[in-house]
Amino acid sequence: MARFLIQSQTTGRFLAPSLSDGQPEWVSSLKQAGGGVMSEMEDALQLIQDHCDFDDLPQVVDLDRLGTLQDYPA
């Protein structure tokens, strides 16, 4: 099962559900973003469309790709 997170290229923050009301919010800690891990790329793209501004420069990060031969270039 894939694991995707949304990260802002502008701030480095992650888009994840708020612990208080479940609404998406930007958090700085990967630990806080754990609730925002999605298994479907379509869900991540919809969340970007619904909750991100152009200035956020959102990107979908595949957590299973990190640390592998297909890791993102530095």
Image (tube, helix red, strand yellow):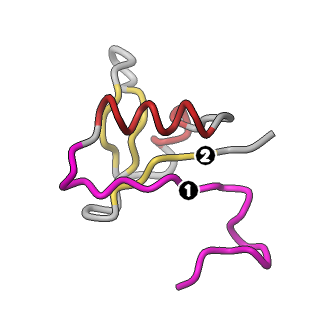
Question: Can you identify the residue that label 1 sits on?
Answer: 61
Query: Left or right: 54 with respect to 1?
Result: left
Query: Left or right: 19 with respect to 39?
Result: left
Using the image, determine if residue 58 lies above or below residue 48: below
Query: Left or right: 74 with respect to 29?
Result: right
Residue 4 tag number: 2
Q: Residues within 10 Å of mark 2 (few under 14, many from 20)?
A: many
Between the C-alphas of marks 2 and 1, the distance is 5 Å
Question: Which image quarter holds the N terminus?
Answer: top right
Residue 37 tag number: none
**The magenta stretch spans which residues?**
53-74
- Label 1 residue SS: strand
Q: Mark 2 and 1 residues: CB-CB less than 8 Å, in contact?
A: yes
**Residue at 63% across, 55% down:** 62
**Residue at 57% across, 34% down:** 42
**Residue at 55% across, 30% down:** 43
Give amino acid for label 1: Val
- Label 2 residue SS: strand
**Residue at 45% across, 31% down:** 46
Of 25 and 47, which appears nearest the observer? 47
Give amino acid for label 2: Phe
Does the magenta segment cover residue 71?
yes
Q: Which quarter of the figure has residue 35? A: top right
Using the image, determine if residue 47 lies above or below residue 2: above
- Type of secondary structure dominating the magenta stretch: loop
